[in-house]
């Protein structure tokens, strides 16, 4: 993610109080969101890295995923200590680990911004869109990264029909 994209995310975060980031990796975008959000940021990841980078034919080629988790913790240490960043560790498709108030709670308890950047795979992006569409608060912002990837475009087309790309970025918004 480049500086222009991070700047756009920072400006959006300033106006949102409960942000969910699906796919946090090493925490660069999480840091951007948390530094600018007046409320809380929920970082949702399994910290097993990008599947297209660390897996070949279903086999893991990365020897130690604990380093990704450690780097995330180092990058977000102050926000983790103050609990401004709340970690939801697990597979993006496991809805049982999502805070229940995000689905059943009042609108003010649901996320008012969701940033999806957990996968480039069509099936997984579609799943993430469907999961978080149901949990996004009324008038919330649904956005994500990697709008140029075929799997992301296909999932967006099927779930939302249309979306816009922020100029000079790979960020999509529905």
Image (cartoon, rainbow, N blue to C red):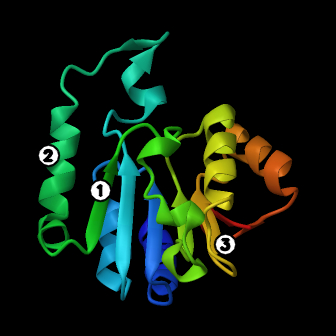
Q: Position of residue 58 (x, y in %)?
A: 47, 12
Q: Residues within 10 Å of mark 3 (few under 14, many from 20)?
A: some
Please name whichever residue, 148 or 153, is drawn nearer the observer in this view of the structure: 153
Tell me which corner region of the image, top left, top right, bottom left or bottom right, holds residue 85. Answer: bottom left
Residue 29 in sight:
no
Tell me which corner region of the image, top left, top right, bottom left or bottom right, holds residue 61. Answer: top left
Quadrant in the picture for the C terminus: bottom right
N-terminal-most mark, 2 or 3: 2
Please name whichever residue, 162 or 82, is drawn nearer the observer in this view of the structure: 82
Which element type, helix, strand or loop, lies under badge 3? loop
Quadrant in the picture for the N terminus: bottom left
Q: Residues within 10 Å of mark 1 (few under 14, many from 20)?
A: some
| Number of marks present in the image shown | 3
Tell me which corner region of the image, top left, top right, bottom left or bottom right, holds residue 51. Answer: top left
Which element type, helix, strand or loop, lies under badge 2? helix
Which element type, helix, strand or loop, lies under badge 1? strand
Give the numbered dot on residue 30.
Answer: none
Question: Residue tagged by mark 1?
Answer: 87
Question: Residue tagged by mark 3?
Answer: 166
Residue at x 11%, y 69% (from the top left corner): 81
Question: Residue tagged by mark 2?
Answer: 70
Label 1 and label 2: CA atoms lie apart by 13 Å
Vertical placement of residue 59 versus 53, above or below: above
Residue at x 48%, y 28% (from the top left corner): 52
Please name whichever residue, 95 or 169, is drawn nearer the observer in this view of the structure: 95
N-terminal-most mark, 1 or 3: 1
Q: Is residue 112 left or right of residue 63?
A: right
């Amino acid at each position: 993610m480049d500086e222009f994209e991070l700047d756009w995310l920072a400006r959006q975060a300033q106006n949102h109080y409960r942000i969910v980031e699906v796919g946090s990796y090493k925490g660069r975008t999480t840091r951007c969101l948390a530094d600018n959000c007046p409320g809380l940021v929920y970082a949702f990841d399994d910290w097993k890295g990008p599947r297209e980078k660390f897996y070949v034919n279903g086999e893991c080629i990365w020897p130690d995923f604990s380093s990704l988790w450690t780097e995330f913790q180092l990058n977000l240490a102050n926000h983790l200590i103050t609990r401004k960043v709340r970690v939801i560790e697990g597979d993006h498709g496991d809805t049982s680990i999502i805070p229940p108030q995000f689905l059943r709670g009042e609108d003010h308890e649901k996320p008012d911004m969701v940033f999806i950047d957990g996968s480039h795979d069509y099936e997984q992006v579609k799943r993430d869109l469907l999961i978080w569409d149901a949990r996004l608060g009324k008038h919330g912002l649904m956005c994500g990264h990697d709008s140029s990837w075929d799997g992301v475009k296909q999932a967006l087309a099927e779930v939302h029909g249309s979306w816009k790309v922020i100029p000079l970025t790979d960020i999509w918004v529905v």
